Image (cartoon, rainbow, N blue to C red):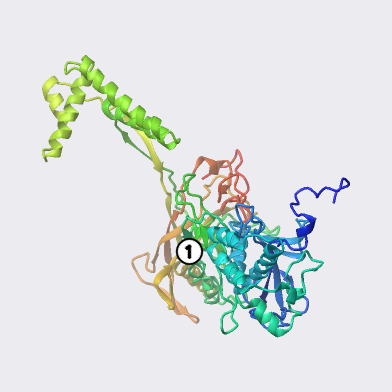
């Protein structure tokens, strides 16, 4: 209480109901196991409560959530998504509503692959969550009894917001509990029915206490508790198990090359080449890294969440890089030729088409802004003005606009009965003039860049030949799609590549172009480039060609934008969103050989 004996701000409790009104704080206990989110370890293990899933005394985690049980609230009976599930060390109370928290799992949070969202859904959908909600609904019954509230009205309000919660509360009300038998009316914890108190009740009273939430086999009956978030919006299903089908592919790839224990596959040709680094001078070279691919919208399919029906802010991406596999270093090839391109095309529009579009656009824009009545009125006014102009002679057939409108109206009318004519042709035949198409070259969109490299191999010894074979396999195996014998419906995407040109000190060669993440589209190897097959004995391979030529064709996954020359990051979510994050496969702190340094005035760029 404050000094003037008035209730503290934010508290609606009166002295007479202080010990009975439910706080709505629920304590969810989940036994330790695979996939269980990090919480607070429960001292003494899982509480000894009837029906609680898990083994009493074994390790468990505790989480706190909140269900709104204020009858005067519009969200009465809804789970509080902002409160989320807090893995707190100390329980919340009215005077310290923030509590002492070491983490909160909230819905819609996409950090670290959406782990908060996944944890929230895991806790909410666990059977022990329904068990925890039951405590507070029994407390609500005690409160309604003490304060002589209309329980039927409370049931009605609960069912309106959360039907299954209302149905469970109705069962509790119909049982007509004698709360004095439970010995808690004078509890010093604000009258909460808590696990700490109930676990000390005799077994028969415990069974009676939990009878509404347990079935005949003493198993928890799962209830659906809504948090009120966009209930009319469809769910984006959780495809994470499908996304993880080929998670072991990178390790399998490296193990097939004899690299075990999570190491990185590193190849260079020739085997004794000095490519710099560590203070050792070397020679200019090309670095080609290989990564496991992930879809650019994979974050939207990794968790179950409600999605908006329209995405009118544009389609945002996440990085296509999932896991670093290996790197190959070779001399820079001789055929370095690249071209950048964008798509431009003819744009044509005549006066009638322009007028019709601008009129329709104005009308529809008003409708989008919510002024549907104004839009309809405007449309009628525009139509009326057109008819008025026709009647007044403004669009007489001797006027250019009248001739054009008449020609197009005739074309439309004849087209309705299957006669196709070209209005422009008849105007040319009649008046010897052509309709002005207002021809203009217009930008259509970007293009994806493709480029080719040719690498010559002439091994000096067996070790060089062994490295050559591994490098050729590095690309052929990396570009191959993946197949799972457990799921033959889908194929896994091939790996992707990143190319860099380095100096003898392993700095970027600014006089050569930069490349975005690429797909390897073809790998062609000529084992007889001189039109004569020649080989020598090889103790490891039996025989090895004297010379081979490997041609690689790459295509970048994304176009080049002006922003790339500014070393800007892409945005993987909408600016202003709490989940806002940035990434860049070129300039971000990513895996592999590391990020490019920002482009300077000496860079040729992409």
Q: Residue 111: horizontal and vertical position, in percent?
A: 62, 57
Please identify the quarter of the rendering in which residue 104 is found.
bottom right
Residue 508 in the figure: left or right of residue 14: left
**Given the current orientation, which residue lies at the most extreme right position?**
3
Q: Residue at x 45, y 35 (%)?
A: 369
Q: Residue 213: horizontal and vertical position, in percent?
A: 60, 75
Q: Residue 95: horizontal and vertical position, in percent?
A: 80, 55
Q: Which residue is mark 1?
A: 237
Residue 213 in the figure: left or right of residue 21: left
Can you see residue 328? no
In the image, residue 347 sits, relative to residue 252, either above or below, namely above
Q: Which of the pair 356/174 is nearer the observer?
A: 174
Mark 1 neighbour class, 10 Å CA radius: few under 14, some 14 to 19, many 20 or more: some
Q: Residue 32: horizontal and vertical position, in percent?
A: 67, 77
Residue 146 in the figure: left or right of residue 236: right
How many circles with numbers are drawn on the protein?
1
Q: Residue at x 54, y 44 (%)?
A: 564
Q: Which of the pair 307/509 is nearer the observer?
A: 307
């Amino acid at each position: 209480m404050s000094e003037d004996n008035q209730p503290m701000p934010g508290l609606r409790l009166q002295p007479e109901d202080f010990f009975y009104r439910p706080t709505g704080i629920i304590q969810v206990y989940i036994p330790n196991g695979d996939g269980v989110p990090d919480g607070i370890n429960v001292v003494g293990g899982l509480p000894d409560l009837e029906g609680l899933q898990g083994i009493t005394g074994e390790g468990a985690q505790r989480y706190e959530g909140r269900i709104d049980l204020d009858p005067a609230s519009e969200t009465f009976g809804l789970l509080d998504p902002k409160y989320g599930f807090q893995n707190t060390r100390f329980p919340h109370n009215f005077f310290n509503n923030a509590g002492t928290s070491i983490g909160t799992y909230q819905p819609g949070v996409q950090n670290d692959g959406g782990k908060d969202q996944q944890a929230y859904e895991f806790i909410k959908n666990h059977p022990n969550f329904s068990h925890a909600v039951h405590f507070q609904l029994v407390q609500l019954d005690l409160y309604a009894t003490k304060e002589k509230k209309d329980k039927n009205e409370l049931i009605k309000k609960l069912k309106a917001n959360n039907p299954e919660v209302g149905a469970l509360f109705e069962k509790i009300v119909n049982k007509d509990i004698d709360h004095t038998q439970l010995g808690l009316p004078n509890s010093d914890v604000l009258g909460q029915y808590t696990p700490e108190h109930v676990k000390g009740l005799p077994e028969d009273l415990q069974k009676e206490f939990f009878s509404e939430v347990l079935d005949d086999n003493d198993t928890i009956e799962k209830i659906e508790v809504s948090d009120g978030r966009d209930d009319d919006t469809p769910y984006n299903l959780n495809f994470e198990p499908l996304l993880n089908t080929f998670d072991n592919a990178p390790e399998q790839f490296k193990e097939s090359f004899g690299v075990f224990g999570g190491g990185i596959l590193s190849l260079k040709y020739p085997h004794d080449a000095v490519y710099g680094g560590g203070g050792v001078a070397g020679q200019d070279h090309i670095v080609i890294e290989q990564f496991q691919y992930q879809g650019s919208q994979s974050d939207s399919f990794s968790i179950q969440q409600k999605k908006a029906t329209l995405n009118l802010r544009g389609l945002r991406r996440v990085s296509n890089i999932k896991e670093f596999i290996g790197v190959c270093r070779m001399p820079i090839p001789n055929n370095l030729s690249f071209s950048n391109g964008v798509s431009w095309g003819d744009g044509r529009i005549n006066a009638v088409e322009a007028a019709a579009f601008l009129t329709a656009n104005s009308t529809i824009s008003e409708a989008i802004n919510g002024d549907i009545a104004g839009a309809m009125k405007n449309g009628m006014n525009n139509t009326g003005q057109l008819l008025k102009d026709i009647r007044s002679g403004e669009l007489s057939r001797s006027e250019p606009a009248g001739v054009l409108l008449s020609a197009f109206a005739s074309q439309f009318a004849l087209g309705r009965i299957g006669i196709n004519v070209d209005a422009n042709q008849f105007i040319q035949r009649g008046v010897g003039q052509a309709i002005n198409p207002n021809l203009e070259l217009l930008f259509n969109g970007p293009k994806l860049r493709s480029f080719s490299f040719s690498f010559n191999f002439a091994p000096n010894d067996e070790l060089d030949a062994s490295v050559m074979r591994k490098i050729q396999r590095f690309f052929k195996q990396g570009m191959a799609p993946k197949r799972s014998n457990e799921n033959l419906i889908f194929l896994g995407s091939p790996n992707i590549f990143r190319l860099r040109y380095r100096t003898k000190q392993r700095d970027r060669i600014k006089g050569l172009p930069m490349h975005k993440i690429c797909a390897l589209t073809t790998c062609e190897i000529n084992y007889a480039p001189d039109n004569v097959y020649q080989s020598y004995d090889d103790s490891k391979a039996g025989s090895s060609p004297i010379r081979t030529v490997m041609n690689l064709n790459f295509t970048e996954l994304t176009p080049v934008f002006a922003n790339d020359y500014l070393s800007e990051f892409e945005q993987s979510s909408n600016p202003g969103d709490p989940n806002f994050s940035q990434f860049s496969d070129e300039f971000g702190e990513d895996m592999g050989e590391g990020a490019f340094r920002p482009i300077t005035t000496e860079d040729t760029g992409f």
